[in-house]
Image (tube, rainbow, N blue to C red):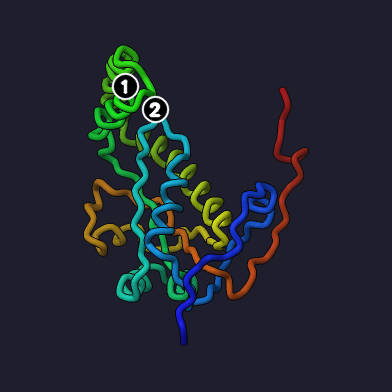
């Protein structure tokens, strides 16, 4: 059977991307996403905002048969998504991401996004701020930022014609080490399966704005 490599229905229609996104459980296992296109998807997703642009997210793309076989016993509640999708993207945050602060701000100056004076001022404020944060405060901030990039990733995937499903049902204690990552440094956020739906996702009820919104 021939392998199908995606050029599916790409779209820039914002309403189509947002309103027609579904969480898909069953994918066409013959559909593959090239690493070139996956890199493009991840690059677009990484335009998501983060606290002082620290970009703490890290992606582990599991797209090989061997990788999926390793992941499957760790994702016991999400076997179908794991084994049929084109890839599963494990989203982590880097607990030591402060190590990149000089590079991030330095490149911003180099590329003309900020002045040297602004960089010096912001680094003088940011470094002690991060140094004095508690572990729980740092975790909360990194989880928020990683949630933003995860949602953006799913919308970008939809714009490329692919379907996704965010998953929390996996062994968070073992996944980093299973793939050779430092479990103390790289903290799991979620798994996101990506591919082409073999079975369409179901629409779901959403509470009205009047229920979820307070005006002040």
Q: Which residue lies at the image location 41% right of the left edge and 65% below the top edge?
A: 34
- In this rendering, position of residue 174 left or right of residue 17: left
Would you place residue 86 above or below residue 20 in this image? below
Q: Which residue lies at the image location 57% right of the left edge and 54% below the top edge?
A: 159
Q: Residues within 10 Å of mark 2 (few under 14, many from 20)?
A: few
Q: Secondary structure at mark 2?
A: helix
Q: Of 144 and 154, which appears nearest the observer? A: 154
Q: Which residue lies at the image location 29% right of the left edge and 49% below the top edge?
A: 186
- In this rendering, position of residue 64 left or right of residue 32: left
Distance from the alpha carbon under mark 1 to that under mark 2: 8 Å
Q: Which residue lies at the image location 49% right of the left edge and 76% below the top edge?
A: 4
The tag earlier along the polypeptide, 1 or 2, is: 2
- In this rendering, position of residue 205 left or right of residue 40: right
Q: Give the percent coordinates (x, y) of residue 101.
A: 27, 30
Q: Of 214 and 65, which appears nearest the observer? A: 65
Give yes or no for contact between labels 1 and 2 (Cβ–Cβ under 8 Å).
yes
Q: Secondary structure at mark 1?
A: helix
Residue 77 in view, yes or no: no
Residue 169 in view, yes or no: yes
Residue at the extreme bottom: 1
Q: Give the percent coordinates (x, y) of residue 136.
A: 36, 36
Disc assigned to residue 126: 1
Disc assigned to residue 150: none
Q: Residues within 10 Å of mark 1 (few under 14, many from 20)?
A: some
> Quadrant location of the C terminus?
top right
Q: Give the percent coordinates (x, y) of residue 63.
A: 37, 68
Q: Of 92 and 213, which appears nearest the observer? A: 92
Q: Which residue is mark 2?
A: 52
Would you place residue 41 above or below residue 87 in this image? above
Would you place residue 214 above or below residue 43 in this image? above
């Amino acid at each position: 059977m021939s392998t199908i490599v995606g050029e599916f229905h790409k779209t820039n229609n914002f309403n189509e991307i947002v309103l027609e996104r579904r969480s898909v459980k069953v994918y066409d296992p013959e559909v593959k996403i090239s690493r070139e296109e996956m890199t493009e998807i991840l690059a677009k997703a990484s335009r998501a905002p983060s606290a002082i642009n620290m970009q703490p997210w890290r992606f582990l793309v599991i797209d090989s048969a061997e990788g999926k076989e390793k992941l499957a016993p760790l994702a016991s509640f999400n076997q179908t998504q794991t084994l049929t999708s084109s890839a599963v993207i494990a989203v982590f945050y880097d607990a030591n991401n402060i190590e990149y602060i000089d590079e991030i701000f330095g490149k911003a100056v180099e590329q003309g996004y900020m002045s040297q004076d602004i960089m010096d001022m912001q680094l003088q404020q940011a470094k002690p701020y991060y140094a004095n944060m508690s572990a729980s405060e740092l975790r909360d901030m990194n989880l928020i930022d990683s949630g933003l990039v995860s949602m953006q990733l799913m919308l970008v995937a939809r714009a490329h014609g692919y379907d996704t499903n965010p998953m929390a049902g996996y062994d968070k204690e073992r996944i980093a080490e299973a793939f050779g990552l430092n479990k103390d440094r790289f903290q799991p956020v979620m798994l996101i399966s990506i591919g082409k739906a073999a079975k369409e996702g179901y629409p779901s009820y959403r509470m009205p704005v009047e229920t979820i919104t307070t005006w002040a």
